[in-house]
Image (cartoon, helix red, strand yellow):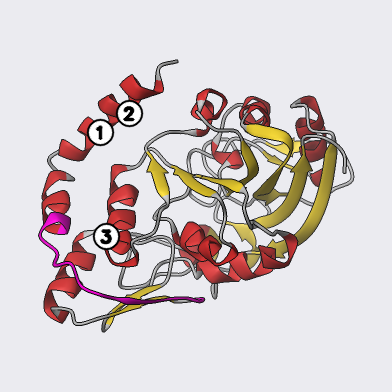
Amino acid sequence: MNLENLRKERQKWMTWKNIAPLREVIQSLEDVTCKVTLGDVIKISGDFDEQKIYKTARMFMPWRKGPFQVGETFIDAEWKSYIKYNLLRPYFDLKDKRVADIGCNNGYYMFRMQEDKPKLLVGFDPSPLYKTQFDFINHFVKSDIIYELLGVEHLEFYEEKFDTIFCLGVLYHRSDPVAMLKSLYKGLDKKGEVILDTFYIEGEDETALCPESSYSKIPNIYFVPTIKALKNWCLRAGFNDFEVLCTSVTDANEQRKTDWIEGQSLEDFLDPDDNSKTIEGYPAPQRVYVRLMKDKK
């Protein structure tokens, strides 16, 4: 696969009629000296045209990951992404490592990862809007993060192999989860690791829920496995070590409607009379976080 040709083709996505005006706005932003604080809220302070910053950020809606604060503008994203990040934080050390974030959205996690001083930090996400949100924030942060309009299927052809790959909230969107896990495996260097986050259902059997048409109103969710089934997928993909780090239940504190998104959020996805079930009657979303090793420790 020729990635350079693919990059050129995907760069044309930035000229789409709904994206091109947003790119022009970013190019018009002044080059302001900023102070950046990489905490739960990624804060950027400087001598801004506050009205322009606010109007610009609103143009890039919906904001799914965050929060960010640019000057006086607080971008209250749908997800309080620091909850997941802080949950995982004790389990990794990225210093001097080559790191990839698959499905990186607007880069919130990668901005946070800078505190570890990785050798290389690359985000993969084929979304022109999310890349534009990233470029807006990075205009002020001025990080060395590389954002590729590529997907997980391109990992094995990428110019670098990675020491750590994050894949958070992507696997259940794939109709062939084992094939995706194989792509993650092929993207790792020797002794590399994957930090994986995905939905799971309770149970001791090696089975998976296969939603008829949607899960929590999300149409592109194909399989929700038990942890035992997930382990089997990972072993079939070639991984030699499967370690459950923790589990969590997504709640309305972590994911909710805000003024910075369009449409519905978690409260609309669950049974209004029983939050332990989705609107379709399936078990409500639970997440399992695992570490996958290419070679055993």
x, y percent for residue 129: 29, 48
Give yes or no for residue 15 being in the magenta stretch.
Answer: no
Find the magenta span and give its range.
26-40
The image's mark for residue 7 is 2
Q: Which residue is mark 3?
A: 136
Foreground residue, 69 or 229? 69
Q: Secondary structure at mark 1?
A: helix
Quadrant of the image occupied by residue 289? bottom right
Q: Residue type at mark 1: give it.
A: Gln
- Disc 3 from disc 2: Cα separation: 20 Å
Label 3, label 1: how far apart the Cα atoms are: 17 Å
Identity, as a three-letter code, of the amino acid under mark 3: Phe
Is 161 positioned to the left or the right of 6 in the image?
right
Name the amino acid, label 2: Arg
29 is within the stretch colored magenta:
yes
Q: Callout 2: helix, strand or loop?
A: helix
| Residue denoted by label 1 | 11
Q: Is residue 228 visible?
A: no
Q: Residue 229 location, x and y as percent?
A: 80, 37
Q: Is residue 108 above or below residue 234?
A: below
Task: Please say if the residues under marks 2 and 1 sit with CB atoms less than 8 Å apart.
Answer: yes
Q: Residue furthest top?
A: 1
Mark 1 crowdedness (10 Å alpha carbons): few <14, some 14-19, many ≥20: some
Residue 89 at x, y percent in the picture: 67, 66
Say which residue appears at 52% left-offset and 23% top-offset. Answer: 157
Q: Earlier in the sequence, mark 3 or mark 1?
A: 1
